[in-house]
């Protein structure tokens, strides 16, 4: 046993219940493994952070992470998996620059707006349209109702022959999740930053899936792009080399120095997920956690979540207190009880509990117990 492991078996690590929306909680087992391997990775006398990304050892770390993700999500062979930088936000630019025709025959892309993140995605894409590089069509938005539901499909104004259809599968701030991929003819592009790996998805229904790592994958600094082969290789002349999916795919995401340590840690998280029984097992647990929390919210008029029940997120649960003047007291007492990062996003107010894969059922139970007691004491 290494020194690091001895240290931690003697003393249980001090770990509180962390409901942060991102960078979010990571599995304690994963952090312990990273700690044990930190100074001396596999007897090589260096840490993963100190290795050349071109070395045989690191290439193996990187490939194993990809293989593990491919097994977890059952990613078909005709999809590339890229490990890039710039977060999900830079993908808001990369997507139109790679997939939208900006030549004589201007292409059109369809965007569905269901919350803060899809709003940012279309805003960024429109910057290129404003420069004459393709056209952007918003098919529908639920903004008028403050993003508590998804506009009905019957109201979507689709383009004639869109080059892609973009949507956000889980709106992290508004707590609105689309569990079924929209049925559209154009290649489907999904921002899955806050719901990837929370349940199985049929990757073959998508043209491209992207996700920033710091919610459900690993540390910040990494974004994963899963893209179908036939969609790449047609980037705009304006697309920076680093954002060109074909370039990155040809160089195994190592066109320049990748986020090596975040990539390694993502690999440890994938391994951990496989050991938990994969995405079927995670989905079951995630449903259980979400049900418990929504039941606690709905069981009293002290708490409120106004999201359309069929779209209530199983990852990010915003809620308000009946009496907002109790917000500060709620947060202070929660923190004393070891329940961290429950303050809601400034756009929505109130509270938000993010209950990603690494947040255990025990943590959600502790939150629900606290909420019931707080409601009881302050009603
Ligand atoms: C967090 C988040 C983003 C932005 O991610 P960055 O890595 O900070 O760029 C985009 N979309 C969704 C759904 C998110 O949750």
Image: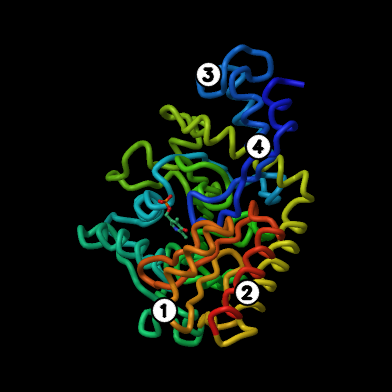
Q: Earlier in the sequence, mark 1 or mark 3?
A: 3
Measure the C-alpha gap from mark 3 to mark 4. 17 Å
Measure the C-alpha gap from mark 1 to mark 3. 51 Å
For label 1, count other residues whose C-alpha is less than 10 Å away and answer few (under 14), some (14-19) or many (20+): few
Residues 45 and 144: in front is: 45
Q: Nearer the viewer, mark 3 or mark 2?
A: 2
Residue at horizontal 50%, vertical 87%? 154
Query: In the figure, is residue 194 to the left or right of 201?
Result: left
Q: Earlier in the sequence, mark 3 or mark 2?
A: 3
Q: Earlier in the sequence, mark 4 or mark 2?
A: 4
Residue at label 2? 373
Q: Which quadrant of the frame does ligand 1 lie within?
A: bottom left
Residue 68: x, y in percent?
Answer: 69, 40
Q: Residues at badges 2 and 1 in contact (C-beta under 8 Å)?
A: no
Q: Nearer the viewer, mark 2 or mark 1?
A: 2
Residue 51 is marked as 3
């Amino acid at each position: 046993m290494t020194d690091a492991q001895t240290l931690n078996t003697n003393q249980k690590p001090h770990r509180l219940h962390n409901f942060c929306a991102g960078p979010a909680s990571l599995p304690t087992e994963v952090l312990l493994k990273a700690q044990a391997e930190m100074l001396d990775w596999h007897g090589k006398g260096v840490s993963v952070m100190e290795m050349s990304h071109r070395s045989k050892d690191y290439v193996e770390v990187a490939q194993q992470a990809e293989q593990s993700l491919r097994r977890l999500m059952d990613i078909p062979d005709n999809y590339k998996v890229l490990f890039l930088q710039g977060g999900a936000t830079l993908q808001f630019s990369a997507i139109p620059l790679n997939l939208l025709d900006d030549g004589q025959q201007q292409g059109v892309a369809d965007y569905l707006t269901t919350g803060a993140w899809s709003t940012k995605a279309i805003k960024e894409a429109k910057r290129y349209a404003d420069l004459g590089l393709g056209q952007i069509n918003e098919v529908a938005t639920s903004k008028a109702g403050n993003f508590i539901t998804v506009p009905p499909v019957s109201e979507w104004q689709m383009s004639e022959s869109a080059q892609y259809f973009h949507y956000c599968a889980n709106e992290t701030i508004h707590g609105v999740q689309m569990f079924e991929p929209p049925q559209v003819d154009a290649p489907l592009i999904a921002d899955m930053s806050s719901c990837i790996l929370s349940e199985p998805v049929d990757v073959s229904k998508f043209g491209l899936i992207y996700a920033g790592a710091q919610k459900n994958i690993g540390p910040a600094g990494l974004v994963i792009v899963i893209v179908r082969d036939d969609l790449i290789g047609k980037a705009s002349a304006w697309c920076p080399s680093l954002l060109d999916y074909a370039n990155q795919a040809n160089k195994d995401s190592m066109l320049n120095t990748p986020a090596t340590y975040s990539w390694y840690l993502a690999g440890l998280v994938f391994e951990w997920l496989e050991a938990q029984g994969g995405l079927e097992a995670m989905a079951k647990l995630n449903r259980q956690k979400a049900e418990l929390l929504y039941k606690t919210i709905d069981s009293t008029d002290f708490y409120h979540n106004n999201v359309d029940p069929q779209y209530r997120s199983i990852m990010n649960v915003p809620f308000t207190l009946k009496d907002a003047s109790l917000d500060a007291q709620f947060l202070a007492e929660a923190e004393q009880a070891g329940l961290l990062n429950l303050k809601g996003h400034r756009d929505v107010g109130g509270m938000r509990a993010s209950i990603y894969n690494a947040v255990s059922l025990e943590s959600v139970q502790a939150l629900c117990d606290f909420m019931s007691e707080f409601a009881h004491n302050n009603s």
